[in-house]
Image: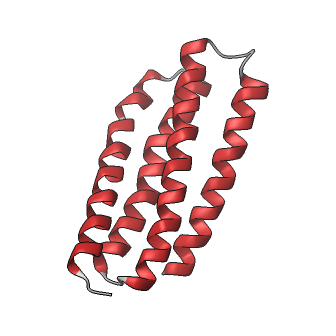
Amino acid sequence: MEKLFAAIGAFSAFIAVAAGAFGAHFLRSRLSPDLLAIFETGARYQMYHALGLLLVAWAATRWPGGSMELAGWSFIAGTVLFSGSLYLLALTGMRWMGAVTPLGGIAFLLGWLCFALGMWRKRP
């Protein structure tokens, strides 16, 4: 599982950098400032949680268990739901996508909670 989380984390970081560059160089003149800010928030949180997923991959080698696995899957789900909905909202203007974003935020919170529990409950 650690290898999978590390690979997905690295790929997600790649996408976050690409999205940030896309926003800064291509979208800046095409989106309103508020939609651009929404897009940039998606890229920023994707990078935070890509790094979090890399951290989970490392931590799972030291503190293996279900909590670490759930943390990793929660970060992946959160990225898809949170960042994905913000990207779609910014690019399409479909405001209803904003209703999906909090579900991603909840997944992120669950991931961090599981990460903390996984470290707390296991001895190295």
**Can you give x and y, in whole percent of width and height, for residue 1 in the image?**
48, 81
Residues 46 and 120: in front is 120
**Can you give x and y, in whole percent of width and height, for residue 37 in the image?**
55, 22
Residue ID at (57%, 71%):
6
Residue ID at (26%, 86%):
123
Q: Residue furthest front?
A: 124
Q: What's the image's color scheme?
A: secondary structure
Q: Residue furthest right?
A: 25
Q: How many marks?
A: 0
Residues 113 and 123: in front is 123
46 relative position to 68: left or right: right
Q: Is residue 16 above or below residue 66?
A: above
57 relative position to 65: left or right: right
Residue ID at (69%, 29%):
23
Quadrant occupied by the C terminus? bottom left
Residue 105's image quarter? Answer: top left
Q: Residue furthest bottom?
A: 124
Residue ID at (30%, 51%):
109
**Can you give x and y, in whole percent of width and height, for residue 77 in the image?**
42, 56
Residues 8 and 61: in front is 61
Residue 98's image quarter? Answer: top left
Q: Is residue 77 above or below residue 46?
A: below
Q: Is residue 47 above or below residue 42?
A: below
Please say whether residue 88 is visible from this viewpoint: no
**Can you give x and y, in whole percent of width and height, for residue 91 in the image?**
62, 27
Please say whether residue 94 is visible from this viewpoint: yes
Residues 124 and 112: in front is 124
